[in-house]
Amino acid sequence: MLARRLRDRPAWRQWDAPRIAETCAFNDWLRAEAATMDPPVRLLDTTTAPLEETVRAVTTWARAVLGGKTLRTTSM
């Protein structure tokens, strides 16, 4: 699915076969190793998830990680 999504991107984004293969290999590695990382990486598969479900999952995760803190951004 990831390879197909990358191939379907516009040509100007330059997703050729070697770059797609490298990205898919990294994705496989990350999925296999995520739980062993310090801190563990939490994965979110959005392949078939509706937008609202993805937003809810990311919001819940961000609130848990921030623990009531807010992110500050600076102007450049």
Image (cartoon, helix red, strand yellow):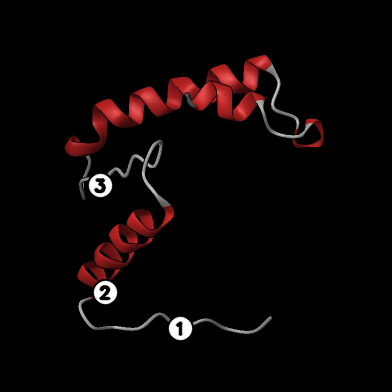
Q: CA distance from mark 3 to mark 1?
A: 23 Å
The answer to whether mark 3 and mark 2 are in CB contact below 8 A is no
Ranked by sequence position, the earlier of labels 3 and 1 is 3
Please tell me the numbered disc located at residue 38: none
Specify few, some or many for label 1: CA neighbours under 10 Å numbering under 14, 14-19, or 20 or more.
few
Ranked by sequence position, the earlier of labels 3 and 2 is 3
User: Mark 3 or mark 1: which is in front?
Assistant: 3
Residue 44 image point, x, y percent: 32, 44
Q: Residue at x 64, y 15 (%)?
A: 18
Q: CA distance from mark 3 to mark 2?
A: 15 Å
Residue 40 image point, x, y percent: 20, 46
Front residue of 43/72: it is 43
Specify few, some or many for label 3: CA neighbours under 10 Å numbering under 14, 14-19, or 20 or more.
few
Q: Residue at x 69, y 33 (%)?
A: 9
Q: Residue at x 34, y 31 (%)?
A: 30
Ranked by sequence position, the earlier of labels 1 and 2 is 2
Residue 53 image point, x, y percent: 33, 55
Q: Quadrant of residue 67?
A: bottom left
Residue type at mark 2 is Leu
Depicted 14 relative to depicted 45: above or below: above
Residue type at mark 1 is Arg
Specify few, some or many for label 2: CA neighbours under 10 Å numbering under 14, 14-19, or 20 or more.
few
Q: Is residue 71 left or right of residue 10?
A: left
* SS of the residue under disc 3: loop
Residue 26 image point, x, y percent: 44, 26
Q: Which residue is mark 3?
A: 42
Q: Which residue is mark 2?
A: 66
Please tell me the numbered disc located at residue 72: 1
* SS of the residue under disc 2: helix
Residue type at mark 3 is Arg
